[in-house]
Image (tube, helix red, strand yellow):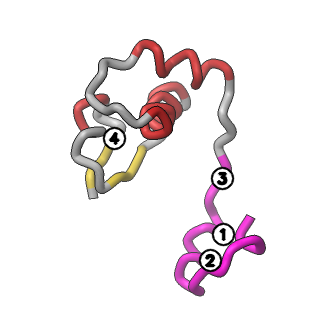
C-alpha cells in the first residue's frame, strides 16, 4: 500500500502495522441507518465501517463524533 504514495518515514512506520479495511455491502447498508449528523457520504461510510467492525475512527471532524463512541476526535 505505501509504495504507491510518497510518505514520510514516520507515516510508513505507522502504516507498517495497519490493516486495510475494505468496503463491504454491510458497511454500505449501515450508512442508511445513520442519523443525518453529517452530509458527506464518504465520511458516513467510514463511520458505518467503524461501527460494523468495530474499529476506532480517528478524525478531526467534530460532526462525526455524535455517531458513536468509536469516533474519536483528534
Check the image and report above or below for 73 versus 52: below
Does the CB distance between marks 2 and 1 fall below 8 Å?
Answer: yes
According to the image, label 4 marks what residue? Answer: 71
The N terminus sits in image quarter:
bottom right
Task: Give the image location of residue 18, x and y in percent.
Answer: 62, 59
Q: Residues within 10 Å of mark 1 (few under 14, many from 20)?
A: few
Separation of marks 3 and 2 at Cα, in angstroms: 13 Å
* Residue at the image position 37 percent from the left and 19 percent from the top: 34
Which numbered disc, 4 or 3, marks the residue that appears first in the sequence? 3
Give the alpha-carbon distance from disc 4 to disc 2, as whole Å.
23 Å
**SS for dot 4:** strand
Which tag, 3 or 2, sits closer to the chain's start?
A: 2
If the image is split into quadrants, where does the C terminus sit?
bottom left
Say if residue 60 shows up in the picture.
Answer: yes
Residue 54 appears in the figure: no
Q: Which residues are magenta?
A: 1-20
- Closer to the chain start, of discs 4 and 2, is 2
12 to the left or right of 38: right
Quadrant of residue 33 within the rendered picture: top left
Which residue, given by chain and number where applicable, does mark 1 sit on?
A: 16
In x, y percent, where is residue 17? 63, 64
Q: Residue at x 28, y 50 (%)?
A: 61
- Mark 2 secondary-structure assignment: helix
**Residue at image mark 3:** 19
Asked if marks 4 and 3 touch (Cβ < 8 Å), the reply is no
The 10 Å Cα crowd at callout 3, few under 14, some 14 to 19, many 20 or more, is few
Quarter of the image for residue 53 reads top right
Q: CA distance from mark 4 to mark 1?
A: 22 Å
The outermost residue toward the front is 39
Q: Which residue is mark 2?
A: 12
Which numbered disc flags the more N-terminal residue, 4 or 1?
Answer: 1
Amino acid at each position: 500500500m505505501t509504495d504507491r504514495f510518497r510518505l514520510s518515514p514516520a507515516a510508513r512506520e505507522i502504516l507498517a502495522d495497519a490493516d486495510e479495511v475494505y468496503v463491504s455491502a454491510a458497511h454500505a447498508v449501515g450508512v442508511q441507518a445513520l442519523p443525518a449528523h453529517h452530509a458527506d457520504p464518504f465520511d458516513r461510510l467510514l463511520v458505518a465501517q467503524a461501527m460494523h467492525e468495530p474499529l476506532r475512527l480517528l478524525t478531526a471532524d467534530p460532526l462525526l463524533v455524535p455517531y458513536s463512541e468509536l469516533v474519536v476526535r483528534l
